[in-house]
Image (spheres, rainbow, N blue to C red):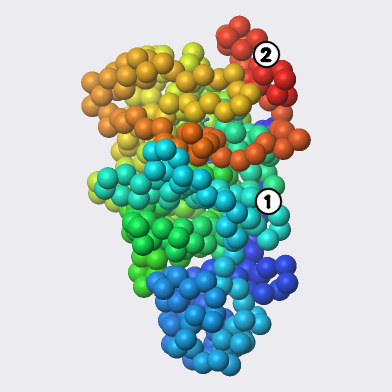
């Protein structure tokens, strides 16, 4: 990627290719307005329809038996219940489940269900592929093929609940699947509203986390328009390294990013999460740990260290467990709230940075800065995989 920032599509997709309305693209108010204005229905019909969509998790209008037959027939003609088609499911040995979905317009996206003792987290995608070109991430190698509609984002949650809700209820949502959610803010922000609607999916905003590579204007917009939690992929402590592994840094460098986060609205007790992928020899020295302290000094935060998950062709390696432990212990001793993310689902390529299928036209690989050339003589993709 060059230094130009990817621009947001500045529009929401509300219809499928046949001109039918995607019901899950509507917030509750928008659904009511549509029913009143377009279908000439009474406002209370919106409450009934909303509860079929988000509480009873209906998959067709036929199921909505307390709606009159003529109303259902008109809905059938004008609107769609589901926006995604289940493509495959894989259950990993540790109980993590990867679901893949087919999009109408072609292409497959992925969601991951991660059960732990006290919660069930669903990791959802916001784009088909990604434009940000982080050098260590598999999704980046797809390039950006499309922005998901609000309906396609919300439907990942609805259909996952429909499939697994009986077993255990999904309690937490993380926008940490494929894509840069703030590059698709126009569709993602309404989706967060729908997910947190009380009389619907009813996820608490405290349990919805959006993770970004650091798009400054959209971080500010998120703070103004929603109450969801923010996670930021930090991944490096100098502009030199971050410019290389996360080229978005050339547009929004570290010091500006941190200033923005210092101003991000947080309620009492809330924190920003910094994700930090541990890459051997790249960002894992104790000097890096020291710089993390300095960068985040004014930000209520916690640090989540992520062991690098390898994928075919990459020459990045995860820091050794002892290195990660030393890094963690250093920060811990300085009273930083720091955790190491347990790697989940990696036997089915469902772990962080392992979602997606690279295409033929991969975005450009960037050369490491001078001091790291010796460590990456072939760059960061093996020759036979370029
Ligand atoms: N685009 C958003 C959402 C993706 S979240 C963002 O950048 O925050 C996915 C997280 O996994 C990010 O923190 C990213 O830095 C991290 N990640 C990407 N590739 C990885 C890999 N191969 N191993 C471990 N973590 C990875």
Q: Which mark is residue 82?
A: none
Q: Which residue is denoted by mark 2 in the rendering?
A: 378
| Quadrant where the N terminus is found in the figure | top right
* Residue 114 higher or lower than 105, as above or below: above
Q: Residue at x 48, y 26 (%)?
A: 308
How far across and how far down the image is residue 341, in percent? 37, 32
How far across and how far down the image is residue 68, in percent? 51, 92
Q: Residue at x 62, y 77 (%)?
A: 79
Q: Which residue is denoted by mark 1 in the rendering?
A: 107
Between residues 9 and 126, which one lies in front from this camera angle?
A: 126
Estimate how packed mark 2 is, as few (under 14), some (14 to 19) or many (20 or more) residues with alpha carbons within 10 Å: few
Furthest-top residue in this view: 374
Q: Answer left or right for 356 relative to 284.
A: right
How far across and how far down the image is residue 256, in percent? 49, 34
Q: Answer left or right for 206 relative to 13.
A: left
* Residue 334 higher or lower than 121, as above or below: above
Between residues 142 and 218, which one lies in front from this camera angle?
A: 142
Q: Residue at x 51, y 19 (%)?
A: 317
Mark 2 Cβ inside 8 Å of ligand 1: no
Q: Residue at x 65, y 57 (%)?
A: 103
How far across and how far down the image is residue 373, in percent? 62, 10
Estimate how packed mark 1 is, as few (under 14), some (14 to 19) or many (20 or more) residues with alpha carbons within 10 Å: few
Residue 225 in sight in this render: no
Residue 11: image quadrant is bottom right
Closer to the N terminus: mark 1 or mark 2?
1
* Residue 289 higher or lower than 222, as above or below: above
| Quadrant where the C terminus is found in the figure | top right
């Amino acid at each position: 990627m060059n230094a130009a920032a990817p621009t947001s599509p500045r529009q929401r997709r509300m219809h499928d290719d046949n001109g039918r309305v995607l019901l899950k693209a509507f917030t509750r108010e928008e659904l009511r307005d549509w029913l009143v204005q377009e279908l000439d229905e009474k406002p209370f019909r919106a409450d009934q329809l909303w509860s079929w969509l988000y509480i009873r998790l209906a998959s067709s209008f036929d199921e909505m038996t307390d709606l009159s037959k003529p109303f259902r027939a008109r809905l059938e003609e004008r609107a769609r219940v589901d926006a995604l088609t289940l493509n495959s499911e894989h259950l990993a040995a540790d109980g993590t489940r990867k679901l893949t979905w087919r999009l109408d317009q072609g292409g497959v996206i992925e969601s991951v269900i991660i059960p732990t003792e006290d919660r069930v987290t669903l990791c959802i995608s916001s784009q088909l592929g990604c434009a940000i070109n982080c050098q260590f991430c598999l999704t980046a190698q797809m390039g950006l093929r499309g922005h998901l509609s609000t309906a396609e984002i919300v439907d990942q949650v609805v259909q996952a609940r429909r499939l697994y809700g009986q077993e255990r209820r999904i309690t937490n949502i993380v926008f940490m699947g494929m894509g840069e959610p703030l590059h698709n803010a126009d569709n993602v922000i309404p989706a967060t509203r729908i997910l947190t609607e009380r009389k619907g999916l009813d996820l608490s905003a405290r349990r919805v986390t959006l993770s970004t590579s650091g798009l400054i204007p959209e971080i500010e917009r998120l703070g103004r328009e929603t109450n969801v939690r923010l996670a930021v992929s930090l991944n490096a402590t100098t502009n030199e390294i971050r410019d290389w592994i996360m080229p978005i840094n050339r547009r929004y460098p570290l010091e500006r990013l941190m200033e923005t986060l210092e101003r991000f609205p947080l309620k009492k007790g809330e924190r920003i999460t910094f994700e930090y992928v541990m890459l051997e020899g790249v960002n894992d020295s104790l000097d890096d740990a020291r710089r993390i302290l300095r960068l985040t000094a004014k930000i209520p935060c916690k640090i989540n260290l992520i062991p690098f998950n390898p994928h075919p062709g990459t020459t990045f390696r995860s820091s050794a467990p002892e290195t990660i432990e030393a890094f963690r212990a250093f920060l811990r001793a300085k009273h930083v709230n720091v955790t190491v993310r347990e790697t989940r689902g990696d036997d089915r390529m469902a772990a962080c940075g392992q979602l997606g299928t690279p295409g033929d036209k991969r975005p450009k690989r960037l050369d490491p800065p001078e001091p790291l050339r010796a460590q990456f003589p072939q760059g960061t993709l093996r020759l036979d995989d370029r």
